[in-house]
Image (cartoon, rainbow, N blue to C red):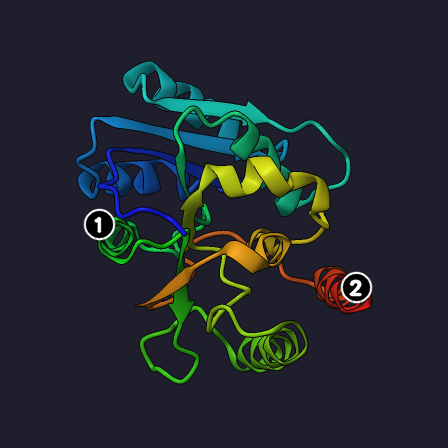
Amino acid sequence: MSKNLKIEELSIVIPIYNEEKNIKKLWIEIRKNISLKKFELIYVDDNSKDNSHEILKKIINKDNQVKVLIRKNKIKDLSKSCILGFSNCKYKNILVMDGDFQHNPKYIPKFIKKFNSSSCDVVVGCRNFFSINNKGLNFFRTLVSIILIFIINFTLGKKTSDPLSGFFMFKKKLFTKSKKKFFKKGYKILADIIFANEKNIKVEDIKINFEERLYGKSKINVKILFFLLIFVIRKILK
């Protein structure tokens, strides 16, 4: 069980791919919403083909608390990008969020507050699938997410209302001690973290609105859904 300690340091990991129009705005908004002195922002670029690299270079020159990691691999994979980011975090608390601005930085203080007050190991930003304020969720994505979440929570045991969320905060030790058990494929690293540590983990939820993507294209496709199903099957068999 975690002790109730005040969060004084934080690493934020943001996996990106072709997000040239979102990077700078996201960096500015994160800066507005975080007051911790011990803080780092790690962009993990899955070898973008647009102008993301040049924009990141300009940000690094202005902000020494920003780091950039380039994952040069032909196969794009958000989970592997996250794992690379986690491995390079210097602080013991990590927050993960998307780089497309569908995860609003205004929720960062809420994550920290929940962590400080609840003696938990993970805080999950849960999407309300039935709210009209979740503009980033179309009918197909909502339906698929609800079905997959039901399958995960029914077969593996409910730990959170949204095990497929990409916006969450957790203690780095959960990754360090259990990374060898991770599935390491697909776009939903949260389920890996939770169910690799399921016996001794305390998870808390906060509600978020899933914002509409302003620029770029969604990375969700049939291949990602396939990996999610394989993940669930492997966990059941174990």
Left or right, residue 193 beside residue 99: right
Left or right, residue 230 beside residue 215: right
Question: Which quarter shows the C terminus?
Answer: bottom right
Q: Image point 53% across, 82% down: which residue?
A: 139
Whole-percent x, y for residue 48 in the image: 60, 34
Query: Please, what secondary structure does the residue beneath circle 2 have?
Result: helix
- Front residue of 128 and 169: 169
Q: Image point 76% across, 40% down: which residue?
A: 75
- Residue 228 visible? The answer is yes
Against 91, residue 93 (above or below) is: below
- Residue 218 visible? The answer is no
Whole-percent x, y for residue 10 in the image: 33, 34
- What residue does disc 1 label? 109
**Kind of residue at disc 1:** Pro
Against 230, residue 45 (above or below) is: above
* N-term mark: 1 or 2: 1
Query: Please, what secondary structure does the residue beneath circle 1 have?
Result: helix
- What residue does disc 2 label? 230
Q: Any mark on residue 91, and which?
A: none
Left or right, residue 12 beside residue 149: left
Whole-percent x, y for residue 206 in the image: 32, 65
**Kind of residue at disc 2:** Ile
Looking at the image, how many numbered discs can be counted on the residues? 2
- Front residue of 180 and 143: 180
Q: Marks 2 and 1: in contact by CB < 8 Å?
A: no
Q: Image point 24% across, 33% down: which residue?
A: 8
> How far, Cα to Cα, is label 1 from label 2?
35 Å
Q: Image point 77% across, 65% down: which residue?
A: 226
